[in-house]
Amino acid sequence: MKILLENIKELIQVREIAPNKVSGVEMNELPSIKNAWLFLENGIISDFGKMKDLKDIQASETIDCTGKIVLPTWCDSHTHIVYAGNREQEFVDRINGHSYQEIADNGGGILNSAKKLQAISQEDLLVQSATRLQEVMQLGTGAIEIKSGYGLTTEAELKMLRVAKQLEEIFPITVKTTFLGAHAVPSEYKDNKQGYIDLICTEMLPKVAEENLADYVDIFCEKGYFTVEDTHQLLSEAKKYNLIPKIHVNQFNAIGGIAAGVEHHALSVDHLEVLNPEDIEVLKGSVTMPVALPSCSYFLSIPYTPGRELIDAGLPLALATDFNPGSTPSGNMNFVVATACIKMKLTPEEAINAATINGAYAMGISDTHGSITKGKSASVIITKKIPSYGYLPYAFGSNLIDSVIINGELI
Ligand code: NIG
Ligand code: FE
């Protein structure tokens, strides 16, 4: 397929040489070309430039983008999109005054989803998850990370990851998978957490590695879930299988999980709604990307990650959805970008960088995604006619996407 996009009002996030991430004040720069063309060939960005310099190009399809903006597709580096059923009842329980933690302590939460996941067939799980994946592709997500973590038995964890791999085969979207066996302690192990960690280390990890089902490993490092010591143990063990960490930390309590992640060279530390000054210090100079999940804060009415503070401290920041049945039943990256601007005081430039280049870094794909760069994946969003890219977060509730191309395929 050779697709020519012409008369583009503004081509956003153009990087001749793409950095693998942007940090601090660099995040406020969003290079672009006004009145541009873009040529996509065999799933790859092959060339681009100003309309006045457009030479004769043989395309199989030409798309007129008059009045429209073109930008790289979103890189959603943190999701739990493979899950069974929903948790609508818990949503209503929270409206009626019960807290997220209280519901989890009473057998709801992750354990509720685990029951449903263990009961569903792989076929039905695939169908439910595919529906969500197709929806987010239409919303402009071109690369997605998918976690396990609702299985909590060896078989069910493998089932989740196998479904994630099937999704990768069926759809054009780029998929990275993460093994999150340490998402919660199953009720059978409620008085024997170490027994469950041993199961993860001696049975789950080897099987996940044997079938090559995961790129990354994750753990929910949080009071009532897994401690910093558990985190060290799991991440050390996972290293033997070349699984790089991307971990859930500082959602409700700051217990030192960020330092543990940094020590293990985690690719990302995610959530960070509650941060100590020491947590910010330890991230400086590290390879670890802080990831904020503002639609989780929105849905649970918990604090927003202090993204402004992180960027002002010279750090990078990525944005992701956290799409899952309990804390964020939404995979809309457009809403995430808008909410980061509205609630976390990021500028549109910072938010778009956080959801593209830095999102790509947080899932290990910055060589191929996150910017308009020759040789990168032909994955772009074409907006409807809008006045400027700042209009995307400004008009936060509107669907401003005209069409999406993912790895060269028109969605
Ligand atoms: O990232 N915080 C831990 N895990 C998920 C949600 C778990 C759930 O409630 O199902 C999250 O928010
Ligand atoms: Fe999550």
Image (cartoon, rainbow, N blue to C red):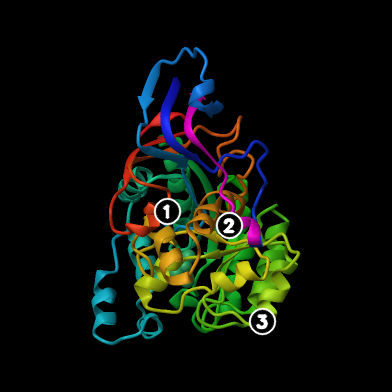
The tag earlier along the polypeptide, 2 or 1, is 2
Asked whether mark 1 and ligand 2 are closer than 8 Å, the reply comes as no
Asked which quadrant contains residue 138, the reply is top left
Q: Residue at x 67, y 62 (%)?
A: 288
Picture coordinates of residue 269, whole percent (x, y):
60, 66
Q: CA distance from mark 1 to mark 3?
A: 31 Å
- The residue under label 2 is 28
Please state which amino acid type lies under the numbered disc 2: Asn
The tag earlier along the polypeptide, 1 or 3, is 3
Please tell me whether residue 305 is drawn above or below residue 86 in the rendered image: below
The tag earlier along the polypeptide, 3 or 2, is 2
Q: Residue at x 62, y 48 (%)?
A: 364
| Quarter of the figure that contains the N terminus | top left
**Relative to 330, is 209 on the left or the right?**
right
**Relative to 242, is 49 on the left or the right?**
left
Where ligand 1 lies, by quadrant?
bottom left
Q: Residue at x 37, y 31 (%)?
A: 65
Please tell me whether residue 220 is drawn above or below residue 158 in the rendered image: below
Asked which quadrant contains residue 110, the reply is bottom left
Q: Residues within 10 Å of mark 2 (few under 14, many from 20)?
A: some
Instruction: Using the image as rendered, state which of residue 104 and residue 317 is in the foreground.
Output: 317
- The residue under label 1 is 390
Please state which amino acid type lies under the numbered disc 1: Gly
Q: Nearer the viewer, mark 1 or mark 3?
A: 1
Instruction: Using the image as rendered, state which of residue 325 and residue 281 is in the foreground.
Output: 281
- The residue under label 3 is 277
